[in-house]
Amino acid sequence: MNVLSHRGYHAAVAFDPDDMLFTGRVGGIRDIVGFHGATVEELVTAFREAVDDYLETCRVAGKSPDKPYSGKIMLRVAPQLHAKASLAAELSGMSLNQWGEKVLAEALAAS
């Protein structure tokens, strides 16, 4: 996956063969911020401008911009999975949060 980053915001990009454009959308926020470009250079410039425009629009409107991720994850899992994860964390000498962060990091490193 190709990801662009600017000022703490990230976006995945794709190529649209029908329109012959690179397209993208800022991820991790509720607001919709999209951009496009015919070349890689145009795409990167459009992404940076989109993030900057989003932040300026929020400032002018007196709205706090969405922050990309707070570090909190709320998961609903089957009670049996919760019990197994809690036991694995305890046996590893970690809190469930510490253990979960370690497992997620390992899974992402393997992907």
Image (tube, rainbow, N blue to C red):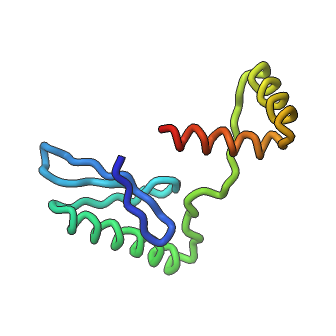
Residue visible at 77% across and 44% down in the picture:
97
| Spot occupied by residue 11 in the image (x, y as percentages of width and height) | 40, 56
Residue visible at 29% across and 67% down in the picture:
44
- Number of numbered discs visible in the structure rendering: 0
In this rendering, would 32 be left or right of 23? right
Residue visible at 58% across and 63% down in the picture:
67
Q: Quadrant of residue 84?
A: top right
| Spot occupied by residue 26 in the image (x, y as percentages of width and height) | 42, 57
Considering depth in this image, is 73 or 90 the residue closer to the camera? 90
* Outermost residue to the top: 80
| Spot occupied by residue 34 in the image (x, y as percentages of width and height) | 34, 58
Reply above or below: 110 against 36.
above
Considering depth in this image, is 103 or 56 the residue closer to the camera? 103
| Spot occupied by residue 18 in the image (x, y as percentages of width and height) | 12, 43
Reply above or below: 35 against 73.
below
Considering depth in this image, is 38 or 62 the residue closer to the camera? 38
In this rendering, would 63 be left or right of 56? right
Reply above or below: 101 against 79.
below
Considering depth in this image, is 1 or 105 the residue closer to the camera? 105
Q: Quadrant of residue 66?
A: bottom right
Reply above or below: 76 against 12.
above
Residue visible at 84% across and 28% down in the picture:
87
